[in-house]
Image: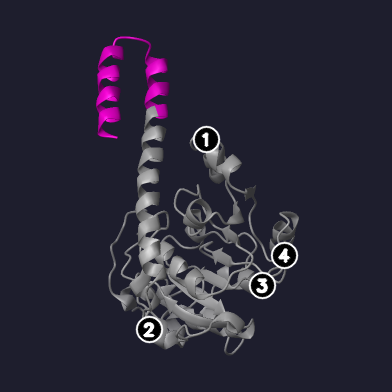
Amino acid sequence: MRENLMRARAWYRRQLLGDTPQLLRQIAFDQEQLRVEQDELKLSLGKLHATLVSNAQYASIQEAEFKVFSQFGEDGIIQYLIRHVPVPNTTFVEFGVEDYREANTRFLLMSNNWRGLIIDAGTAHLEFLRRYNGDRLLWSHEIHAISAFVTRANINDLIRRAGISGDIGLLSIDIDGNDYWIFDAIDVITPRIVVIEYNSTFGPELRITVPYKDDFNRLAAHHGRLYFGASLAALCDLAEAKGYAFVGSDSVGVNAFFVRKDVVGTLPVLSAREGYVESRVRESRGADGSNTYISQHRDRLRVIADMEVYDLSCKRMIAIRDAFGLATGD
């Protein structure tokens, strides 16, 4: 890799006074090739790490964490779970993938040769698959990509039309909004493992979620970017009703992991309180869009205090201020 970089630098120096558009195209091509080489190295190291994880027995799934293509340590947790959960149908469904450079299923695709479906409202994931290493991911793996805004009404049809149904290996949901409602609506598949993002700001106790809205957009819903998704307790209750056991959160406090009860085996089963992790990710924004770096949990709640959530325990809308006992003007 270092030799290739040195050759590229020498070529650029020779071309500085030449054809600028051609040079720009070459730079873009070389940048993509460099990313491919880096990915190959990460993939090789990830496979070694996965081998170590597969031979381990952990008290917490967090001990298995490592990152290859996932945002945080999800790759390691998923590798650990598929070593402890029998998966005859190595198929995944993931939505909310953005451009798919960073995703929960990409390592499964490239390292474990799983097949699957990815969905996002944009087209960046389609372009990435077509462009990456001469469309290698498309011809060397069975992956289907759809551009669609996921709703309760269309999610089952989107999955079914991709030829996927019934008992599959993994479902990953990360849409920063209607996550609870979409998980509730899915009945065309019965994944053995489910990964779903929860909103740590909503705490470990209350069973609450943002109300369903077909076109919910986290960035438009509130400038603070803290108003989205569901509490961990809400997701645990829904998962229980759908036949799943909660086996833990990642150490960052972003994703919850569930395993179907009939295949959970010896994996530890936790309550929402036992598995809750308060996230330290500081992604709150001010009205001007600047990062406010709010750390304290209660201070984050104050940012969205006037927004309403749906309380699943009493089946009604409630202001966040009232749900968490924040004083007026707090």
Q: Amino acid at mark 4?
A: Ser
Q: Amino acid at mark 2?
A: Leu
Q: Which residues are magenta?
A: 1-29
Residue highlighted by disc 2: 326
Q: Is 190 inside the magenta-drawn segment?
A: no
Answer with left or right where residue 210 lies relative to residue 274.
Answer: right
Frontmost of labels 2 and 4 is 4
Q: Residue drawn 60% across and 62% down?
A: 90
- Indicate which disc residue 131 carries: 1
Residue highlighted by disc 4: 165
Q: Residue drawn 38% across and 83% down?
A: 326
Mark pair 4, 1: CA separation: 29 Å
Q: Residue drawn 48% across and 59% down?
A: 104
Q: Residue drawn 56% across and 37% down?
A: 130
Give coordinates of residue 177: x percent, y percent: 54, 65
Of pointers 3 and 1, the one earlier in the residue sequence: 1
SS of the residue at dot 1? helix
* Vertical position of residue 311 compared to residue 70: above or below: below
Residue highlighted by disc 3: 190
Q: Report the predominant secondary structure element of the magenta stretch.
A: helix
Q: Amino acid at mark 1?
A: Arg
Give coordinates of residue 27: x percent, y percent: 37, 25
Of pointers 4 and 1, the one earlier in the residue sequence: 1
Q: In this view of the protein, can residue 20 be seen by the observer?
A: yes
Of pointers 2 and 4, the one earlier in the residue sequence: 4
* Vertical position of residue 200 compared to residue 36: above or below: below
